[in-house]
Image: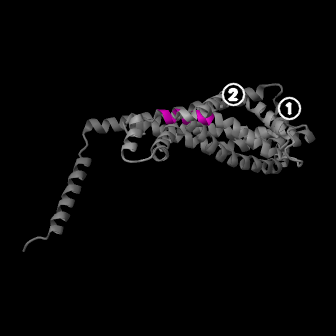
């Protein structure tokens, strides 16, 4: 009786699995000792970290309780009564910050990409736009964000372009977009310039147009390279959207200010701080994870 090809393939697969299993099980004593040493070192690091954290927390708590003014500070900044009272209003104000943040992220992504593409363009016809983009990024990065908010928030209404009152949150969104577009554009420009020229040349040799090369080859590679920096700018933007309160928009910060003005207790500011922290932590952890992932891939010699 002649065995079929499928029978031979099954037997070969079983033999390969058996060989791999035997190779895995036959670990040398040296390798086992190395693995055991690494496990002990990892456990030691975890225990040391926990102990040092507990010791530091105990020192901070002891120092606060020994301070003569701690009872008054605790009542003024960490009052459970005012925390519960102000939490709903501050949370309602936070939704305005979230809306502004979403619109600002979209606006910055579009505007900053256009600026970066203009600044990396080699076309002589684009020289006036390149000079204007360079001037814009230089000026906007030199002005503090709160000053940008004042200039936009009070300057645009002063032009009297419309008889109706412009929503302060809209003006704040425009200011955030204008301010952060300059920073993000420079990050993107660095990413575009970091893509090797051979990538563009190869794409053009395959018949791709300049626009297709930029859209399909340059931008994806650049975004992977500058993703950690972009995430840091996004996290900073999360905090700075709270500055729209200086224009009168009732966001989380303004809601906290209203509560403080009526109670003379600063706990609402702590409430606003905690809400902003909770909103930022997931993106901070994501940034740390992605940065570590890129670092490992670079060290292993993989493509970034």
Which residue shows up at 63% across the image and 33% down it? 183
Q: Earlier in the sequence, mark 2 or mark 1?
A: 1
By secondary structure, the bulk of the magenta-drawn segment is best described as helix
Residue 192 covered by magenta stretch: yes
Position of 191 compared to 24: left or right? Answer: right
Give the residue number, with chain letter if any, for mark 1. 72
Task: Say which quadrant the N terminus sits in.
Answer: bottom left
Of 167 and 68, which appears nearest the observer? 167
Tell me residue 260's x, y (percent). Answer: 88, 39
Residue 251, relative to residue 57: is it above or below? below
Q: Quadrant of residue 5?
A: bottom left
Of 94 and 230, which appears nearest the observer? 230
Q: Which residue is mark 2?
A: 139
Q: Please tell me in which quadrant of the rendered image residue 283 appears.
A: top right
Quarter of the C terminus within the rendering: top left
| Magenta-tinted stretch | 183-193
Looking at the image, which residue is at 84% across and 46% down?
Answer: 166
Q: Residue at x 48, y 43 (%)?
A: 214
- Circle 1: is it few (<14), some (14-19), or many (20+) Cα within 10 Å? few
> Going by the image, does 137 lie left or right of 31?
right
| Rendered location of residue 39, percent (x, y) | 40, 38
Q: Is residue 223 visible?
A: yes
Q: Hey, which residue is sitting farthest bottom in the picture?
A: 1
Residue 14: give x, y in percent of width and height. Answer: 21, 60
- Give the left or right position of residue 194, taking residue 14 as reference: right
Q: Position of residue 299 (x, y in %)?
A: 39, 34
Residue closest to the eye, 213 or 298: 213
The crowding category of the residue bearing disc 2, from other C-alpha atoms within 10 Å (few below 14, some 14 to 19, many at least 20), is few
Q: Is residue 39 visible?
A: no
């Amino acid at each position: 009786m002649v065995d079929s090809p499928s029978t031979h393939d099954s037997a070969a697969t079983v033999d390969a699995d058996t060989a791999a299993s035997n190779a895995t099980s036959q670990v040398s004593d040296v390798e086992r000792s190395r693995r055991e040493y690494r496990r002990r070192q990892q456990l030691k690091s975890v225990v040391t970290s926990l102990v040092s954290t507990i010791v530091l927390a105990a020192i901070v708590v002891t120092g606060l309780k020994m301070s003569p003014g701690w009872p008054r500070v605790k009542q003024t900044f960490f009052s459970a009564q005012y925390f519960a009272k102000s939490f709903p209003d501050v949370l309602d104000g936070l939704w305005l910050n979230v809306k502004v943040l979403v619109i600002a992220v979209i606006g910055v992504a579009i505007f900053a990409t256009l600026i970066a593409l203009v600044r990396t363009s080699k076309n002589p016809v684009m020289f006036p736009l390149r000079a204007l983009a360079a001037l814009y990024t230089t000026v906007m990065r030199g002005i503090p964000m709160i000053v940008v908010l004042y200039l936009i928030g009070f300057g645009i209404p002063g032009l009297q372009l419309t008889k109706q009152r412009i929503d302060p949150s809209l003006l704040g969104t425009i200011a955030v977009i204008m301010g952060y577009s300059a920073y993000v554009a420079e990050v993107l420009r660095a990413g575009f310039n970091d893509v090797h020229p051979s990538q563009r040349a190869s794409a053009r040799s395959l018949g791709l147009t300049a626009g297709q090369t930029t859209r399909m080859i340059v931008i994806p590679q650049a975004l992977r390279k500058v993703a950690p920096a972009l995430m840091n700018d996004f996290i900073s933007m999360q905090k700075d959207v709270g500055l729209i309160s200086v224009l009168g928009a009732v966001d989380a910060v303004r809601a906290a200010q209203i509560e403080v003005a009526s109670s003379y207790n600063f706990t609402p500011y702590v409430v606003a701080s905690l809400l902003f922290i909770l909103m930022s932590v997931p993106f901070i952890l994501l940034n740390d994870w992605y940065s570590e992932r890129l670092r490992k891939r670079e060290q292993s010699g993989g493509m970034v």
